[in-house]
């Protein structure tokens, strides 16, 4: 069970492993997501990742054309709502079942490749005797 990963510190694996803790924290987690307000602007959670990170940039480049288009559309739609100082209409909010981690698998694979590359780059090669 790893709590430090490429996407930051997370207690989620520990919470998910405990049924009682998961049951207690689920209402708090839902309250926090609603308080954050990103779904009211039409965003998904992965749209909030910091794009300046190199691994996130490479993960964004690996998105399918459809995922890339959808991501750009969400940003443009939220930008327009911000200019108008209004939230999107309720029917356009991101629903909890639609809020999936579409970018996380790509970020994890980029991080795994970086670790493997570092291992190969620091490998010591010795000649046979």
Image: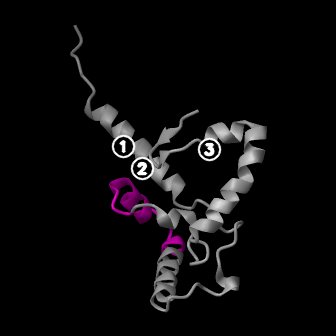
Q: Could you say which quadrant of the image residue 30 lies in?
A: bottom right
Seen from the viewer's position, the closer of residues 13 and 24 is 24
- Circle number at residue 110: 2
Which residues, given as a range, are shown in magenta? 51-68
Q: Is residue 58 magenta?
A: yes
Seen from the viewer's position, the closer of residues 96 and 67 is 96
**In this picture, residue 84 sits left or right of residue 35:** left
**In this picture, residue 10 sits left or right of residue 51:** right
Query: Would you place residue 79 above or below residue 50 in this image?
Result: below
Badge 3 crowding class, 10 Å Cα cut-off, few under 14, some 14 to 19, many 20 or more, is few
Query: Would you place residue 49 above or below residue 66 in this image?
Result: above
Residue 45 visible here: yes
Residue drawn at (42%, 49%), measured in percent from left and top?
110
Q: Which residue is disc 3 drawn over? A: 12
Question: Which of the colour schemes (rainbow, by chain, secondary structure, one colour) is used?
Answer: one colour
Where residue 13 appears, as percent x and y from the top left, is 63, 40
Where residue 94 appears, as percent x and y from the top left, is 65, 74
Residue drawn at (68%, 61%), measured in percent from left and top?
31
**Label 1: element kind:** helix
Query: Would you place residue 80 above or below residue 17 in this image?
Result: below
Distance between mark 2 and mark 1 Cα atoms: 6 Å
């Amino acid at each position: 069970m790893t709590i430090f990963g490429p996407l930051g510190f997370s207690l989620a694996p520990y919470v998910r492993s405990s049924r009682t803790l998961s049951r207690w924290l689920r209402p708090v987690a839902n309250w926090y997501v609603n308080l954050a307000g990103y779904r009211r602007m039409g965003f998904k959670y992965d749209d909030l990742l910091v794009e300046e990170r190199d691994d996130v940039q490479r993960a964004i480049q690996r998105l399918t054309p459809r995922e890339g288009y959808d991501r750009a559309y969400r940003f443009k739609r939220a930008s327009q709502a911000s200019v108008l100082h209004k939230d999107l209409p309720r029917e356009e909010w991101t629903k909890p079942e639609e809020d999936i981690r579409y970018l996380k698998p790509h970020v994890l694979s980029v991080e795994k490749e970086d670790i493997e590359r570092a291992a190969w780059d620091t490998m010591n090669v010795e000649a046979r005797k």
